[in-house]
Amino acid sequence: MTDINDGEAWSFADLFDGSAPWDDQSGNGHHAAFPGGTNDPTFFDHDKTQGDNHFRAPGISNNDLTTPDSVALSITGDIDYRWVGIQDDYTPPTAPAIGHKYNFATNNREYRWGLATDGKIRFIWSEDGTSTAGKLHDKTSTVATGFTDGTLRGLRVTLDVNDGAGDIALEFWTLNNPGTDDPENAANWSKLGDTVTLGSTTSIFDGDTQVKICANIGGIHPMTVHRYLAYDGIDGTLVLDINPASLVGDTVTQAGTFTEDSAQAATVTINQSGTAELMRMVDRPAFQYDTDDRLEIPDDAALDYTHTDSFTFGLGFRVYDTSPAADAVLMAKKANLTTGDGYAGYLESADATSKGLLADGANEQTATSGNLTNGKAHTLIWVYDGSTTQAYLDGTASGSASADNVAADMANAVALVFASISGGGSYAQVEIWSYAVISQELTAGEVGTGAGTLHDSLLNQTAAVSATVTPAAIATTTTMPGPTVRQDQTLTPASITTTTSMTAPAVSAGSTLTPASIVTTTTFPSPRPTTPFALDLAVRAESVMELPVEAESAMELPVEAESAIEPSVEAESVIELPVRAVSVIELQVESE
């Protein structure tokens, strides 16, 4: 079965190590270069420093999360708000809010909280919805967080409107071990600085504005949300739980809604605006391309094809505007979409379909897919059989095959570029996490939808083709010099270690390599006694191991023969040979 491991060039964002280039995994050296500066795409790290599923707010107005006003969310007494995520800047130039229920224009000021410009945690609330002195309170923690920009952290604020002594008690907290500690457990939080007290009691205004997360109020800047919790009462009743880890990305389209996880089950809306980076849920490692961002694989003849060659190309991606104002490139080894040689995959302008384009400079052919969905994870694959091209959307043949129009060489001297055309121009609202160029025609089954198909690999960033490789048994024999043993002496040799190695086999990532068995035989020559006596020595040690192997990496199979040797000695000689092994070695000695 032909699969992504047979590609001339392929890679996954999941394998990107954070520094350029984006390495080709085929072994052919087609590494994707970053153009540098503002033209570099943004890398969304899902499995490493940024944890699992999370919302990414770009710091652009109207790209936020909102949920409607409700009785449960209109808390007038003690409150407890918690956030886990990443701030691009923990001492921001303005004082943006992490969360708020606050409207200047309608005097619906309830509360807002986030970071102050000096890095302290800030909480503001109004008792009557106005900014009247004595009614509007603006307080910060007594010390700054001191957090490093871009690191995963947890912040918390609690307000006790009457601490029992007639005072307001405001406390600020940080999460002990972000990424591992459960933010719902109050024991996992440590107090930041001193309690801030005011010599009176208070309450929070009950307004009718919605709750907003990462919204623009008093400033806005980029951040992520891994968890957002709101409690009625300090460690009281949970009334809002935004938990992206519980969401499946393909079912939460990026301009859609979802249900939060508290008992209130409120609807949360993902708001998006603009043509640059948008509010989104990051559910996998990916590269986000904004205006003029691109990655380029340098020109190589191995990535060029003639009209009689068969080849397959495709990618895994998500778009946010399926009907762009102009044709929008996904991947292309072509100078432009209208003239010249090469091939490309792109979105048709003012249309929700995509096209695979092949051209020889004078002739071209296109294969059109079905409609794409905004915010949904898709794969697009185009297969050229030497005459016509078939498009596959999400692993299924889509539309009819193209006409047989290409009649000459499709080679060119331009780079293979993602989200752009060689030389400039881009498609701003796209995430790309995988690609493949394979110098073969894949069958419909190999493109497919099941495990190990090209669609599966591009969608889920897995190069595995389910299979079990069972090589023949690996046998090793180790000998040691015969020791001299005197009568009435005990021989205790050091442990015997046997190392067995074999050439690394080619194993698809995620597959399992299970040797039938690994047999190690250790033989001891007869000891040389000073008093003549007969010896019978039989030694055998066997061990079996299963070795899971990932990816096509080099592999050594260390085997230790650790044999327990139990001698049986007649006469007065005692020979004890304790040697680590999984089997029993019996030694019999007869003296004359």
Image: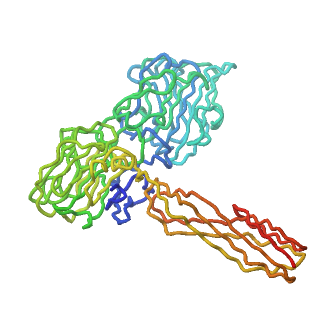
Instruction: Determine the residue positioned at 86% across, 83% down.
Output: 530
Indicate whether 566 appears above or below 404: below
**How many numbered circles are shown?**
0
Q: Which residue appears farthest toward the left when viewing the image?
A: 362
Instruction: Determine the residue positioned at 35% across, 34% down.
Output: 253
* Residue 323 visible at all: no
Image position of 486 (left or right of 586): right
* Residue 118 visible at all: yes
Residue closest to the eye, 53 or 453? 453
Image position of 124 (left or right of 348): right
Q: Which residue appears farthest toward the front when viewing the image?
A: 592
Image position of 75 (left or right of 566): left
Instruction: Determine the residue positioned at 41% across, 28% down.
Output: 258
Screen quadrant of the N terminus: bottom left
Q: What's the coloring here? A: rainbow
Image position of 385 (left or right of 64): left
Screen quadrant of the C terminus: bottom right
The x, y position of residue 157, in whole percent, is 57, 31
Indicate whether 85 appears above or below 384: above
The x, y position of residue 479, in whole percent, is 67, 76
